Every structure is written in structure tokens, then in C-alpha cells.
Image: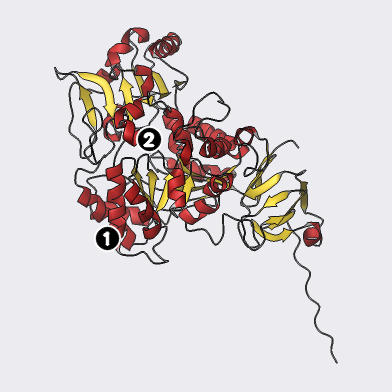
Amino acid sequence: MPSAPATPAPAAADTVLTGARVRTLDPARPWATAVAVQDGRITAVGDEGDVRDLRGPATKVIDLGGATLTPGFVDGHSHPVWGVDMATGTDLSGCRGLDDLRAALAAAARELRPGQWVTGWGLDHNVFGDRPVHRDLIEDALGGAPAFLRLYDGHSALASGAALAAAGIEGPRTFTQRASVVCDDHGRPTGHLVEHAAMDLLLPVVPRPSAAERRTRLLAALDEMAAAGLTGAHVMDLQSPDAVQLLDGIEAEGHLPLRLRLAPWCMPGIGTEGLDHLVALQQQGGRQWRVDGVKFFMDGTIEGGTAWLERPDCHGEGTEAFWPDPAAYTHAVHHLARAGVRTATHAIGDAAVRHVLDTVELLGDTGAQGRHRHRIEHIETVPTDQLARFAALGVVASMQPLHTGYTRADHTDAWSQRVGTERAGRAWRCRDLRDAGAVLVLGSDWPIAHHDPRATLAAARLRRPAGELGTAPVTPEQALTGLMALEGLTSHAALAAGEEAQAGRIAPGFRADLTALAVDPVTAPADDVAAAPVRLTMSGGRVTHRGVA
């Protein structure tokens, strides 16, 4: 009798990772010590014996020396491309009061050549104390130089008198969205520009780095992210007009260190043609990037008085939506949903969160196909009666633990002063949402907060910045467990992207997006996690960072 054909030998792996404590997040096999990778996919997960036969002459073997290997960290809310424009000039995040701010601006102004601008970013609202944000507080430090300073929330800025004059801003303006050129009682602009439409008035005159400089800065930022353990990011914008050209140009000559999913903005005043254009954009992409989803704004920020709240804030503001006609927002979401487009909506205030949930409920699609196709970003304050609706409707909660660092446990900060004690006492309800069954993806909102995922993991557990042992935690009852925090950057991030069948766990057939830390991010003390060396970052099977063992 003819002999049975021999079973072909398995193809050799491109890379074999050994000597690891593999936390797979795969219920079928929670733990392992070795992983094999070929063509960007995981081909084997097990122990040394399970991968021995997958080694070939060209296989690269990496011994992780006892590091903990997890699914690759994904930043659930980031702005890496637009961020290189926003984070331009002097970093003002270290200023703690007006004296610090004025000193920083004076130093920057002294370095200028004639005609140059002072630009800055990361300016904390708390710097102004009880004073309104006003250019009169900084003008003499600038020595007449035009200045454009972004506040840390990304939704407001301070412009000097010379900058306002260069842009031709002499009084209030009318916008199709909730935005304002803040003016005093005499109609004179204070320099405080609230929301994107108002800030955009300065864009034609504010100097912008060259395309080559921006490309260099983008690659540097992405390399830093990879070195911190990030393998991907959900990018909540497509704002830079040359973003696609930047990404295509990088991939034409090399590789993006992170996998990027970009969601262009949908703003008030859009019509059917504009919505259809957003649908068509979903077809664009490259090897490591693609357009997938659309970003909305239902409100602005607490500190700027533009969050949509069910009761006014302590300044009597916050009672209006970003979309002057909230029903138009609902129509736009439904138009995109019918075309199969995912949506993410910035909703900070309780009224904004409620309206987004109502909008999704009106779609009537809570079955398996409709779940996790819509998400809400930030959710800084949410009533108890809305928590269960996230899971019931399949709406993803997307939150940024590092944002609690802009508030104080004693409620003396600008955010807490605005919302009042009762709402400040239920701020950033991460644990309540998880306990209510919601999918909770975690992110940084870089450059609003630092992009390091280790800091995000730590803050999610500590409710204070890592390393600041003397800082009281903000609403500590909302702390996540170590496993919940890790899931927020891995398996829940995959659910939020509709990629749970190929990402978010370490299993055969899944993408080889992997992160290895010197400590176990679940069981190690949170402060230690924030400082843990990154032994390896792999995105799509390509090693994007290799740490020293």
C-alpha cells in the first residue's frame, strides 16, 4: 500500500520570543513562556517545547529574561499627528502661577528675532487662580511680541494684543458652533479664545513648522511612544491638512512605529455632501494607518465653561451644547451609522453624555452587529442613572486617567470649582462604569497629557500621578484594578475598534502587537509600573523598541 503523505513541516517563524512570563489575556491559555511570530501574526503560544520546531536558520530568537509579555498597549485617545502642531513652542505645563508664566514668556521673548512669535502649549487654567484668562496679565512680559498660547485642554488659547491685531480680531465673532472670542464689557477682545473655531482665526498668521520639520517631529514622537510600550493609537482627528501626505511619505521610505486608526472630525453645519465625504474617507489607509471612524464634539471643557451640563456650573455657564441644534448631531450620527461608520463623541458634561446615549438608543441597533460601534470620549461627569446604559446600548466608554492630575482632591482646582462639590465628588467614574459592565478603553489624549502608557496604567489604579506619594488621590473609589487597567489598553481597546478577533490578546492567528515590561503591570505596585523598563515593543511583527535586559 502507498504510504501516507508526510505532514509538511511548519514554516519557520520570523521571530521567537522566549524567557517571558506571557500574560495572554486569552481565556483558552492565560499563561505561557514563549511566542512565535511569522508575517506579522502570532503562530504559536506555549512553552519552549511548543516553539522549538518553529526555529529556522533565519529566525530571530529574543530572550526576554523574565519580562512580562502582554498584548500590545494601544492608546485609546491620542493626537500624534495634530499634536506636533499643538505642542509647538515653549512647554508651559510646568508653570504653577502667573510669576512662572510671565518668566517663561519673557525668556522666550528674549530669544526672538524681529518678527518672530512666542508660541506655547500646556498652559494650566489653574495658573490664573481666580482671575479671568486675559492678555493684560502677560503683555508686558512679551515686550510687544505676538504670542499664541494653547491652554492644556486643547479647547482654548490666549493670544496677545499683537497676535489679535495680526489676525484682524477687533471684537466678538459669530460661529456655527459653540465658540467665542471673549470680550470685555467694552467689546475689546481679552485674548481668550474658546473652542476650535475661535482659535482657528489665528492659524493663518501663527508661524507653522515646515513639512520636513513636522515629519521629523512626528517620527520622533512615534518613536518615543513605541519606546514607552505603545504599539498603536486611536487617533481622534484628521485635522492637519497634510496628515495623509505625512503618513504616506513616512511609509514610502520606512515604517510607522505605531498602528494608527484616524477619525476625522464632523462639526456643526455639515450637510449631506459633507457626511458622504466622511464616509468616503473610510477607504483611505496604508500599511500601519487607516481612517476608521468619525469624531464628534457634543460639548467643550469644564474649565472653559463649554461643557454641556444638566445644571449650570458655578459661573452660571455650561447649559448649551457644542452643536447649537443637538438634533442635527443626532441626524449626522445616524447618517454615518447607516453607512457602517463608527463614531466617537467628545462628551464631558452629564447632559452631553445623556444626549449621546439617547442618540445611540434611537438607532435601535443594540444587537451584536451594533455593539461597540459608538463610543463616548472623556465622560468627566456622568449621573448614576446613566451608567448602566453604556453596557445596555453597547456604547464604549473612553477615558483618560491622567486627566485627574489637573484636579485636586480638596476641590480647590479650576475644574472642581466650576462644577461644584457634588459633581466633583463623582468625577471620572472609571470603576463605576466597569462595574456596570461597560467596555472601558483608556488613553492619554496626548498632547493634553503625556502619552506614556505606563503612566496611564498607574494613574488608573492610583487616581493620582505616579511617584507623587504625597498627593491625595481624586475620587479614589474609582480606581481600577491592575487587570482592568491593562484591559483598557489591550482587550477593551480592541473591542472599541471592532478588532477583538485579531487584537487584544496573545493567541495563534492574532496580530503580533506585543509589549514586554520588566514587571507585571497587573500585580506590581502601580508606582513601579510607571517606572518599569520596557524590554520590547513589537507592532505588526516588527520590533519597534528593544530595551536593555
Point 31% across, 20% down: residue? 159
User: Mark 1 = which residue?
Assistant: 362
Q: How is the image coloured?
A: secondary structure
Measured from the top left, where is residue 454 in percent x and y? 58, 37
Rendered image quadrant of residue 206:
top left
Task: Describe residue 205's horizontal placement relative to residue 475 as left or right.
Answer: left
Q: Position of residue 227 (x, y in %)?
A: 62, 37
- Crowdedness near tag 1: few (<14), some (14–19) or many (≥20) residues, C-alpha within 10 Å: few
Identify residue type, mark 2.
Gly
Instruction: Name the amino acid, label 1.
Output: Leu
Pick the front one: 110 or 141: 141
Q: Residue at x 29, y 37 (%)?
A: 307
For this rendering, which residue is in front, 179 or 520?
A: 520
Q: Given this view, does label 1 or label 2 mark the residue nearer the observer?
A: 2
Mark 2 nearby-residue class (10 Å; few <14, some 14–19, many ≥20): some
Looking at the picture, how far across and down is residue 362, in whole percent?
27, 60
The vertical placement of 72 against 158, above or below, is: below
Percent from the top left, x then y, of residue 436?
A: 43, 53
Q: Tell me: residue 518, above or below residue 151.
A: below
Q: Give the numbered dot on residue 109.
A: none
Circle 1 sits in a helix, a strand or a loop, which is it? helix
Q: Quadrant of the N terminus?
A: bottom right
Q: Nearer the viewer, residue 62 or 314?
A: 314
What is the C-alpha distance between the residues marked 1 and 2? 31 Å
Q: Which of pointers 1 and 2 lies earlier in the amino acid sequence? A: 1
Work out which quarter of the rendered image holds the C terminus and state it. Answer: top right
| Residue at x 69%, y 51% (from the top left corner) | 22
Q: Quadrant of residue 203?
A: top left
Image-quadrant location for residue 520 = top right
Res. 28 visible in picture: yes
> Which is nearer the eye, 295 or 532?
532
> Mark 2 highlights which residue?
425
